[in-house]
Amino acid sequence: MNEAGDKMVTNCEGTSSSHTGKGSKKRGAFCKVKFGSAVVPIYRTESKGRIRFMLSYHRDGKRMRQAFTNLAAAKKEALFVAQRIQSGMQHVTDIKPHERDSLKAALAMLEKSGVPLVAAVEDFMRARDLAGTESLAAMAEEYGRHFKKVIRHASTSAVVNEMLRQREQDGASKAYLRLLKTTLTRFATKFPGDLVNVDAHQIDTWLRSLNVTLCTRNSMLRCIKIFFTFARSRNYLPEERNTAAENLKIAKVVTGDMTIFNPETMAKLLHNAPPDLIPILAIGAFSGIRMAELDRLDWSAVDLERGIIELRAGQAKTGSRRVIPVTDNLAAWLEPLERKGMVVPSVKAHHRAVAAHAAALKIEWPRNVLRHSFISYRIATVKSADQVALEAGNSPSIIFKNYRELTTEEQADKWFGILPKEGQHENPATITKRKRRAK
């Protein structure tokens, strides 16, 4: 056996006793095990017919002895002691033989992995604490079954950037991209690590900690749900199970009575409006189009001859093409206008101007009031939730639940009978071309 050039030498006597009869000289060691310059003697003793082999050596200035019942075990221990003495590590010789064998076996198992013994033990103890009474092997098997197809690992921010690039390449609207970016950037800042480690409880706790309304919280959760679905499609999350976001439910928003304008209020708004605000007010009131959809609409989609407004899939909130009928009174409002380019040339400026226009007339401007008014008066006219849902891009159940019987057919006739007044388009403009803001 060689180690660093040292050789192990064993020299044992052939006698069966380490002492002679009375009056004779005491004999020396029965066996000596040498490694390099270190020598460990083994003495043979006999008492009441029982033979023992005794190791004798010094450690830390003290004489140490170890007894064994057979010579082979004594030689093995003596060699170990000699090696440690030679290397100046005799202080570890207090490890028992079976403990040393276990240590060697553990080191052999770790050799291929390259993991140090201490690191392996620390990792095991941490896993043991986390697992409690559960089997570590069973937990590892379950983890592997769910995550074996996760072949890509990345930080949350990296996946967010990838998704935003894809959505932009696919032609998503600027408003939609802005909403995604705002929400997901905050999400990535909160959870900067590997996305696969984010769970439902963490997401819910974070959303609830924000100082936002319930509607805003729901909107943020919808963005996060879309993000997690994208991440799963790119193998950042396992395919076989729901994502953390999918396990969270959109909170139910309890709303009060639906606010709509009566025909007299709408007529007042329109008859006092300048030409540059007519498209927002008239199309919103008599077609039910969402304001976000109207902001993406260009005049080429408004066909007065065919009597339709064609909302392309990329413009509609639902992502599907929608054809909206143009009522007779809406055609009357739009026909005199110069219909080129975008319907709303400057989104922020025009919407501010509409709000200022309503305020000047002392009319409150509730959120989505034009769309709510159209749907309410339209269902009173056609008596079909399915038809109105198709025109408004909503579900029949929502139409039936929220808008049915909010008004009468007589009021609906007045609503869709609002026409421009004489000299309507002589009203002064409220948007300047240079500053583009409400006067």
Image (cartoon, rainbow, N blue to C red):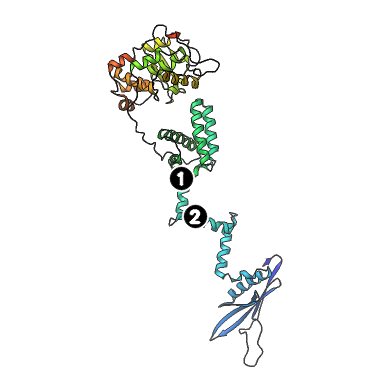
Residue 252, percent across and down? 36, 35
Q: Residue at x 29, y 23 (%)?
A: 406
Residue 421, percent across and down? 38, 8
Say if 389 sits above or below 187 in the image.
above
Q: Could you say which is closer to the camera, residue 423 or residue 377?
A: 423
**Label 2 secondary element:** helix
Q: How busy is the neighbourhood of tag 2: few (under 14 within 10 Å), some, or many (20 plus)?
A: few
Question: In the image, which is nearer the foreground, mark 2 or mark 1?
Answer: 2
Say if 22 sits above or below 233 in the image.
below
Say if 428 sits above or below 241 in the image.
above
Question: Which residue carries the number 1 mark?
Answer: 146
The Cα atoms of the two marked residues, 2 and 1, are separated by 18 Å
Say if 410 sits above or below 208 in the image.
above
Q: Which mark is residue 127?
A: 2
Residue 141, percent across and down? 46, 50
Q: Three-letter amino acid code at disc 2?
A: Ala
Residue 108 in which image quadrant: bottom right
